[in-house]
Image (spheres, rainbow, N blue to C red):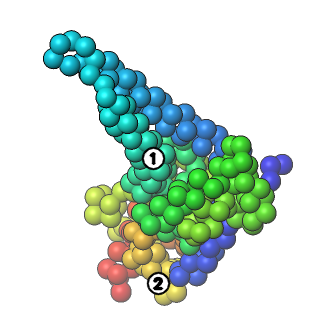
């Protein structure tokens, strides 16, 4: 049996949402992939600068180097390296739903501790502190801190209020990211929704109202959990209808028959 740390979030809908926390091994693998990409980018930049410096010759064909070009090249590589090793993570975490390429390949995601998407400030803080977490050796301090925290957080996560979670397997991503108005609701004329009470439909509608504020993973988990609770009370609903489309259709059906 495999032991997995879990984070329980109490949502405004009155549902306890369980997220599986990423372990040290999977996070280390994701970081190794990301750092390999980052080092490759910096190596390409250095190679390009070396190639350009070889073409830096004066009017007589003699290399014109008073030392300034070397200093500029060093400064350029330093700035580019900082942009890559800090901006890479921030860019992908903010624009990629909490997933860098390494996290995407290993099925991980960064979210706020309350399940909301990670923003620029939180991502910036957690990645600035990566400079501390990576020492000594390769993430030695980070691993020590993660062993001692209940949410498997490194220092950057603690300061930023973030956690790294494992994505639930199964085709849930499309349902979580699809815009509410982008799909047609199924025909609910044959649905019997009389078994869904006022409290149940209130939970459904609270979720539908605030789902856009949730990160993709927690949003899909919460939709699946709510749908699994109310679906047995709805007769005639297609069994293959996804959680969010089902909840949208249920809400519309109850409103039409109010």
Which of labels 1 and 2 is toward the front?
1
Going by the image, does 151 lie left or right of 105? Answer: right
Residue that protrudes farthest toward the left in the picture: 59
155 vs 210: above or below? above
In the rendering, which numbered label is found on residue 141?
A: none
Q: Where is residue 110 in the image (x, y as percent from the top left)?
A: 54, 57
Per the image, label 2 sits on a secondary structure element best described as helix
Name the residue carrying label 2.
202
Q: What element carries label 1?
A: helix
Mark 1: few/some/many CA within 10 Å (<14, 14-19, 20+) = few
x 54%, y 33%: residue: 36
Circles 1 and 2: CB atoms closer than 8 Å:
no
In this picture, is 32 found above or below 63? below
Name the image quarter holding residue 19.
bottom right
Closer to the chain start, of discs 1 and 2, is 1
Residue ID at (47%, 61%): 124
Task: Determine the residue located farthest toward the front in the rendered image.
Answer: 66
Q: Is residue 37 visible?
A: no
Q: What label sits on residue 82 in the rendered view?
A: 1
Give the quarter of the image for residue 149. bottom right
- The answer to whether residue 198 is seen in the rendering is yes
**Nearer to me, 135 or 2:** 135
Left or right of 244 on screen, residue 110: right
Whether residue 138 is situated above or below residue 116 in the rendered picture: above
């Amino acid at each position: 049996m495999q032991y997995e740390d879990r984070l329980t979030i109490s949502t405004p809908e009155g549902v306890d949402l369980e997220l599986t926390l990423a372990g040290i091994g999977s996070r280390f693998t994701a970081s190794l992939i990301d750092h390999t990409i980052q080092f490759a980018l910096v190596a390409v930049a250095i190679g390009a600068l070396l190639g350009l410096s070889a073409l830096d010759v004066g009017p007589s064909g003699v290399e014109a180097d008073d030392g300034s070009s070397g200093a500029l090249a060093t400064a350029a590589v330093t700035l580019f390296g900082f942009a890559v090793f800090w901006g890479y993570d921030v860019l992908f975490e903010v624009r990629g739903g909490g997933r860098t390429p390494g996290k995407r390949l290993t099925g991980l995601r960064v979210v706020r501790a309350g399940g909301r998407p990670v923003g620029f400030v939180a991502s910036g803080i957690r990645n600035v502190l990566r400079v501390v977490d990576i020492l000594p050796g390769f993430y030695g301090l980070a691993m020590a801190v993660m062993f001692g925290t209940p949410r498997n957080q490194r220092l950057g996560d603690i300061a930023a209020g973030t956690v790294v979670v494992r994505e639930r397997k199964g085709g849930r991503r499309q349902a979580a990211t699809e815009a509410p108005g982008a799909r047609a609701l199924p025909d609910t004329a044959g649905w019997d929704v009389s078994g869904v009470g006022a409290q149940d439909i209130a939970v459904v509608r609270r979720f539908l109202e605030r789902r856009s504020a949730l990160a993709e993973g927690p949003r899909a988990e919460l939709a699946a959990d709510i749908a699994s609770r109310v679906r047995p009370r709805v007769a005639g609903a297609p069994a293959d209808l996804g959680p969010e489309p089902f909840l949208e259709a249920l809400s519309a059906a109850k409103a039409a028959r109010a």
